[in-house]
Image: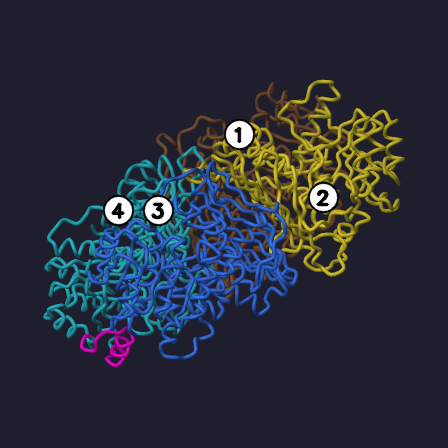
Chain colours: A blue, B yellow, C brown, D cyan
Amino acid sequence: MTAIRLGMVGGGNDAFIGGVHRIAARLDGRFQLVAGALSSTPAKSQASGAALGLDADRIYDDFKTMAIREARLKNGIEAVAIVTPNHMHFAAAREFLKRGIHVICDKPLTATMAEARKMAKAVAECDALFILTHNYTGYPLIRQAREMIARGDLGKLRVVQVEYAQDWLTQASDAKQAAWRTDPARSGIGGATGDIGTHAFNLTSFVTGLVVDKLSADLDAFVGGRQLDDNAHVMLRFAGGAKGMLWCSQVAPGNENGLALRVYGEKGGLEWRQENPNQLWYTPFGAPKQLLTRGGAGTTSDAARVTRIPPGHPEGYLEGFATIYNEAAEAIIATKNDTPIDPQVQFPGLSDGMAGMQFVAACVKSSKCDGAWVRLAT
Amino acid sequence: MTAIRLGMVGGGNDAFIGGVHRIAARLDGRFQLVAGALSSTPAKSQASGAALGLDADRIYDDFKTMAIREARLKNGIEAVAIVTPNHMHFAAAREFLKRGIHVICDKPLTATMAEARKMAKAVAECDALFILTHNYTGYPLIRQAREMIARGDLGKLRVVQVEYAQDWLTQASDAKQAAWRTDPARSGIGGATGDIGTHAFNLTSFVTGLVVDKLSADLDAFVGGRQLDDNAHVMLRFAGGAKGMLWCSQVAPGNENGLALRVYGEKGGLEWRQENPNQLWYTPFGAPKQLLTRGGAGTTSDAARVTRIPPGHPEGYLEGFATIYNEAAEAIIATKNDTPIDPQVQFPGLSDGMAGMQFVAACVKSSKCDGAWVRLAT
Amino acid sequence: MTAIRLGMVGGGNDAFIGGVHRIAARLDGRFQLVAGALSSTPAKSQASGAALGLDADRIYDDFKTMAIREARLKNGIEAVAIVTPNHMHFAAAREFLKRGIHVICDKPLTATMAEARKMAKAVAECDALFILTHNYTGYPLIRQAREMIARGDLGKLRVVQVEYAQDWLTQASDAKQAAWRTDPARSGIGGATGDIGTHAFNLTSFVTGLVVDKLSADLDAFVGGRQLDDNAHVMLRFAGGAKGMLWCSQVAPGNENGLALRVYGEKGGLEWRQENPNQLWYTPFGAPKQLLTRGGAGTTSDAARVTRIPPGHPEGYLEGFATIYNEAAEAIIATKNDTPIDPQVQFPGLSDGMAGMQFVAACVKSSKCDGAWVRLAT
Amino acid sequence: MTAIRLGMVGGGNDAFIGGVHRIAARLDGRFQLVAGALSSTPAKSQASGAALGLDADRIYDDFKTMAIREARLKNGIEAVAIVTPNHMHFAAAREFLKRGIHVICDKPLTATMAEARKMAKAVAECDALFILTHNYTGYPLIRQAREMIARGDLGKLRVVQVEYAQDWLTQASDAKQAAWRTDPARSGIGGATGDIGTHAFNLTSFVTGLVVDKLSADLDAFVGGRQLDDNAHVMLRFAGGAKGMLWCSQVAPGNENGLALRVYGEKGGLEWRQENPNQLWYTPFGAPKQLLTRGGAGTTSDAARVTRIPPGHPEGYLEGFATIYNEAAEAIIATKNDTPIDPQVQFPGLSDGMAGMQFVAACVKSSKCDGAWVRLAT
């Protein structure tokens, strides 16, 4: 087992998500970070790279230089993690994709729909893989929920309730994390919708297999002077007749990362909360509610495949994130070996990213049109 | 302390809510049931009355006879509980109101808006009190939430999430309770919206003091052949700029009486669930989340006033329901004594009933117009 | 249905438990309070009786006068509730028992073992019933747990963990409720052990059917100057080989009425907490954990018999307490009619009271002997 | 930052805890596994080492050969993780310690007290560090609880309730994990007491700072033919007057890794459960209960130091375990640099291991003497 050589764009010293990606890449030993353009400020990139123990000649001042040189090195990077603010995703990804370097990109896909379309084109024209880190799809019980629904445990689906509530933007903030996320130039047209609504939307699709046909949205920016939405109420109509509600908010005091998904069908219901991801509630209609645990009785094959330790010892966010990296590793190795990817391997990719962009665009459009139903492009 | 003489219309042997009203009336010893027209089937009314130990000459075959005779008796009933299906509320209430007998009526107000308007007229033209049993307003911690919001603990309100989910109509049912609730002739135009959505709507108003300006609704009847909605998704816009979502469903397996209210403002958040009504979560923004308990540290005056036992011993649904009867008793006695009603006394009345009817009508109208925003009459 | 005529000894205006007994007696309409000696201070008894609406000639200055006169009245009381501090239970009960008036007595049985033995003699020599209000046995899911264990759902029992934790005596207190409970002259030799330990002990016996053979105890009075235990650690050995731990405390900040019972056998486990008594966790070994709800799927016959309302609307402490009164009513009526008592009727009685006294005595003895194992008399 | 070179003894392909150690060592990038004697069966050691990507010449057939050679290598291992069954801990540790290689050893310390004393001697006579992986001390909120108690938030402590309940040994089992843990030859004299009781005991000491003076224990082996305890009830007396109860069980259906600690003092209480380690309940006496979250409001310095990601995204078991490795890394680097170890660095060591051995010995001795109080050696 040789670790896959990984580079990173963004993720300098004081970034949050870069550190998460590094732990995720390392946790199962499938990747080794060997190069980086860790900041758009060269001095900061150098300092960050040194702190991470990168060889000096593989710390780059900018991602383009890095892409060019690494592509030429004998043992250059095989994959790159892009963990910049949204508006730089495309420009960075393009440089690596076109050189055959696999891209693991943070979500949402891009800041603008125009960039998203270019990203789609870039992905279509290259041989490299594109993985989007909708990390919540890595939780074992999310895999289990998906599998249970797919095999019919809930019967035909009727209702989905999904929400992602936070409180950290309840007041105006100048913190780095807040600054770019509330800035249209760096985040795009979606605020809460783009940052966390896309996660809720993606999780819904991943678990239920349902496709949103139309949505009606009511967006607000409750904090004075804020340019992007910090609260969104969305009604969903799925193809096939199921209905849903999606709420995302960054101004709900008492909520840290309150991502919760509830799905109801003709035969039963499932309920899951991210803050305690090792539990999944399952109610077969007419029978007692069951508390399924990660790795416990009733564990499905897809869940067992991505679980590391026995039940009762919690696996958390980093493990879920690491599973996305593991899946990427599986796909990268299969690609390298020119073998088919195991069908149990699951990772979000370009189409999920496009769907997320369309979700945000539809929310903004609907809200501007007083909540008119907007059809999602398919 | 002499108990108030109470009559009952509806609530025969196999009814559910009649028994609840009787326990609620009795629990604090403020009422004594002395007369009844307990069923529209005379023989059943007689049998039910006998089983309840009513004097034979105060068991009536119909409510009109009862109203006429009781009004003439020296010790006739002072108040009547109306616990029939919705479509009989008005006809029964009118007979008692016009004879000065106070009416305690189950919700929703009536089956149709036309009846509701007549009810409003009947109430306006009489001297009797009209109490509508939106019983959840009787829970001590609901009183506390209301008081905390009114005194500004949450600051200006921004977002309300309210839901009432059940699962008992997941499949088609011929049970008595299901039959009339899914029959437009007896229930009116609202299914889940009328039966439980009105509770969620009323609770929102009661706790937050906010007034819904407009709503957008998407209603479904998921069970084949069902004539009334069994699931409703509603977006709310309150006067003053706050926003909300309301979900009510009777087809969500795993939910028994999942009434939950969450309110978020500029300074904090409150979260409450009916199934464990002795707990209230309060988060002052930036400080740890607090678990307030009924009667525990931080209890407010309005909550203490309606609590019977110290914290840690749960009070439940019947106690909350009994509080509405207690409040009715307070108002009835004040009326009898021609003294002002203590301002802490709180009970839902005609205006709450009218608001509930308008809520249902607006939901149905909006849903028929593809979710167009419908303004609630004021 | 005619209500049973009830008297009360103790329970004057500022008493806690007297009010609870009155609500419990009234809740299901089986009893009517018609007489009382509500305080050992005559003026207070008069004032309290008047406030409760008792006829003036049935408010007594002392319980003996009340017993003598009520026994002679044509419609004198049929039963009496004794809700005084522990040291008066026996003297009061004796007067009523010997006149054939049924006694419903608060727990623990008496203050001293000597009184307990006299109580046993008094009960044995009379025809009246003796009901001890170990009220937690009235919760529907406690009935269900008992039934599940009796029918073998857990297999042979191995381990019982029971606890009752409070915090209200964390500091020295002069409040009335605290004063007599920490006074050996009025409470007896047990502090927390007598007041709440007996509840935990009784609940264990009721649910499991196991009999404690021996116990080893370590008692403390952590608050300076306190004469009775406020914290007790007890190890239990049951006849047949099962083992248990019992913890009771009144100095555990953050606990209100934290009564919790967990039972484990060869085939499964059950877990229940009083503060949310409408839920019961059941784990069949090797299968997912189930959340059983009062009245929900899987409800047993014994539980259904004492449940009033459908699942999802909580029944609380007062309802559970009222069930003891209902059971008393069933037994009283059967006695009156000279018919057998329905075997499903369950209420704690003298033997439970004696067992509780022995439990306290054994705890105190063991603790004085440095935790030596003390056999409980049988 | 150069990773510390790590070897491993035990932890071959089908071992559970070896994999955990490897992830923990890797998670924060402070260690690199470079050598191993992964099984006492040479072929299995080779296969396991190859699967882990170790260089062939650093996969050893036995730990002694490994210790000798690695000590001589220029870039030999600096530390070794010992993850064998208990009875091999000492023999392996000795070889590395005496050669100045730091030892990170799984718990309990050894299988026998005689070995434990030899281990103590070996540690005392060498310059290497000895770290014992009582991993639960790595959870951020456990650090916070320790700090809150140390600074007096609870006042003088009175009562500790600690438990560790599992169910996986409810029935007889031949699985590898079960086999050695129930075999005195490989585990020592403690079953549940040694395997999980030592964790509960260690956590109590770590968090409270209290020292157990004496204990009284009642041990059982409920499963037929089992030689070691599978359930233990223990009463604790701490120096200074506080009291405690400790329950550990492997036969409690419905419990996965139910490690829970509750501490009560004169001024407040703390409650924590391992299965949701990102929450800590804190009740200042007389004020509402607070739900403290990892990284949320009220986070202390010691907790913040070992937290990786913001609140609301759970950190789990592997992160807590990795923190022990991080602390080891801090200490190893300080030792290498001959600088003092930062006083915030906390890791369990020899004295914790000795205390755990004494705990097990005292439990077994007390239980054999019918629960007599046994003083722990100090």
**Most prominent secondary structure in the magenta stretch?**
helix
Label located before the other in sequence (1 or 2): 1
**In this view, the mark in front (1 or 2):** 2
Q: Quadrant of the N terminus of chain A?
A: bottom left
The chain holding disc 2 is: B
- How many angstroms separate mark 1 from mark 4 (CA)? 42 Å
The chain holding disc 4 is: D
Task: Please name the amino acid that badge 4 sits on.
Answer: Val
Identify whether B137 is placed above or below C51.
Answer: below
**In this view, the mark in front (1 or 3):** 1
- How many angstroms separate mark 1 from mark 2 (CA)? 33 Å
Label located before the other in sequence (3 or 4): 4
Q: Are marks 3 and 2 in contact (CB under 8 Å)?
A: no
Which residue is more in the foreground, A302 or A104? A104
Instruction: Tell me the crowding category of disc 2: few under 14, some 14 to 19, or many 20 or more residues within 10 angstroms, Cα based.
Output: many
- How many angstroms separate mark 1 from mark 3 (CA)? 36 Å
Q: Are marks 1 and 2 on the same chain?
A: yes
Identify the residue under disc 4.
D211
Task: Please name the amino acid that badge 2 sits on.
Answer: Val
- Identify the image quadrant of residue D197: bottom left
Q: Are marks 4 and 2 on the same chain?
A: no
Task: Please name the amino acid that badge 3 sits on.
Answer: Gly
In-image side of B246 versus D253 (left or right): right
Q: Are marks 1 and 4 on the same chain?
A: no
Query: Which residue is at a point 75% across and 38% down the rendered structure image?
Result: B109
Which residue is more in the foreground, D284 or C181? D284
**In this view, the mark in front (3 or 2):** 2
**In this view, the mark in front (1 or 4):** 1
* Residues in magenta, as a range: D41-58
Q: Quadrant of the C terminus of chain A?
A: bottom right
